[in-house]
Image (tube, rainbow, N blue to C red):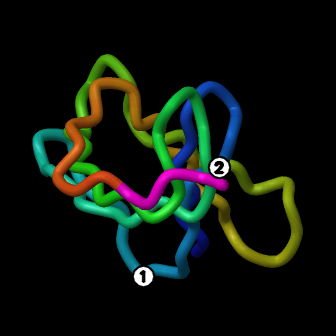
Amino acid sequence: MELRFELSGTVLFKTNSECVPTIGSVVEIRTDSYKKGLNAGSIISVPITDENPPRFVFTEGDIAVVYIEVNGYEIIQEGPTPD
């Protein structure tokens, strides 16, 4: 399945995985795109909560796509500023 980490509808990072982070876990990702002052290349920590649980979508082709909202993220390392 494909995991897509998004912020306000913008996918910041995506990857293939055989499992989905569970409620209560914390995930660290390096963002691939810029959104709302969060630079591409930033490392962020994201709690997986029951307020914003992973959303499973089975209508986008042959594999399941799981959307994980990254609201409440914490910046671990700021990415480079865009030119």
* On screen, residue 72 above or below 48: above
Q: Which residue is labeled 1 in the image?
A: 18
Image point (85%, 54%), residue name: 59
Image: 79 above or below 49: below
Q: Considering only vertical position in the picture, is 17 above or below 46? A: below
Q: Which residue is mark 2?
A: 11
Image quarter of residue 16: bottom right
Type of amino acid under label 1: Glu
Left or right: residue 83 versus residue 45 is right
Callout 2: helix, strand or loop? strand
How far across and how far down the image is residue 1, in percent? Answer: 58, 75
Q: Is 57 on the left or on the right of 24, as rendered?
A: right
Left or right of residue 2: residue 18: left
Residue 25 pos. (x, y %): 13, 50
Name the residue located 66 percent from the left edge and 60 percent from the top edge.
65
* Closer-to-camera residue (83/32): 83
Tell me whether the residue at label 2 lies in contact with that at label 1, contact meaning CB atoms closer than 8 angstroms. Answer: no
Q: Residue furthest front?
A: 83
Q: Quadrant of residue 66?
A: bottom right
Q: Residue at x 72, y 74 (%)?
A: 63
Give x and y (percent) for residue 35. 60, 37
Residue displayed at 39% across by 66% down = 30
Looking at the picture, how far across and down is residue 58, in whole percent?
74, 56
Given the current orientation, which residue lies at the most extreme top position? 51
Viewport quadrant of the C terminus: bottom right
Question: Quick one: label 2, few (<14), some, or many (20+) residues within 10 Å?
Answer: many
Question: What amino acid does circle 2 point to?
Answer: Val
Q: Which residues are magenta?
A: 79-83
Q: Cα distance, mark 2 to mark 1?
A: 19 Å
- Which numbered disc, 2 or 1, marks the residue closer to the eye? 2
The label shown at residue 63 is none
